[in-house]
Amino acid sequence: MAAILYDLLNESPNIKIEISLANLIEAIDYSTKKTIAEREQERHDREQANTLVPRIETAKNLHTTLQTLRRWEQGRYLVPQRIGGKVFYKQADIQRILKQEGGNDL
């Protein structure tokens, strides 16, 4: 709908449109809710990307071994995050490898 309005604006910049107050309020309400939902989804996606996954779970998700994870770490293909002596990997990095390998998302 918005694309149609923008096309109309480009074709006839001086066009006047009559709209009822109720329809205007409905359009603003819809647009506001849609924008809020999009922002919440973006925030959720960012949080998911930064989620840390333990080493063993990462190996299972990537259908590989702990030895392969260590090799990937040495080659900087998959960079671990170390917290309190434990090793984790970012969800975003796991997703990147799955996409490169043609695997399914987690």
Image (cartoon, rainbow, N blue to C red):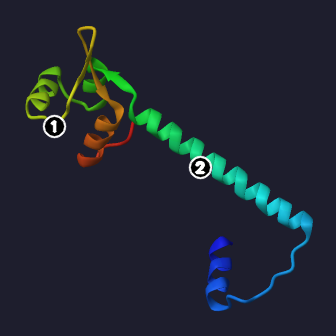
Q: Helix or strand or loop: what does disc 2 sit on?
A: helix
Q: Nearer the viewer, residue 36 or 14?
A: 14
Q: Amino acid at mark 1?
A: Tyr
Residue 49 lies in quadrant: top left
Neighbours of disc 1 within 10 Å: few (<14), some (14-19), many (20+):
few
Q: Is residue 33 left or right of residue 54?
A: right
Q: Secondary structure at mark 1?
A: loop
Q: Residue at x 46, y 33 (%)?
A: 47
Q: Quadrant of the N terminus?
A: bottom right
Q: Position of residue 60 (x, y in %)?
A: 28, 25
Q: Which residue is mark 2?
A: 38
- The quadrant of the picture occupied by the C terminus is top left
Give the residue type that dot 2 points to: Glu
Residue positioned 91% across, 71% down in the render: 20
Asked whether 93 or 11 is in front, the reply is 11
Q: Position of residue 93 (x, y in %)?
A: 29, 37
Q: CA distance from mark 2 to mark 1?
A: 32 Å
User: Counting residues from the N terminus, which is met first, the one under dot 2 or under dot 1?
Assistant: 2
* 106 relative position to 93: left or right: right
Residue furthest top in the image: 84
Crowding around mark 2 (Cα neighbors within 10 Å: few <14, some 14 to 19, many 20+) is few
Q: Is residue 45 left or right of residue 36?
A: left
Q: What residue does disc 1 label?
A: 77
Residue at image point 63% right, 78% down: 6
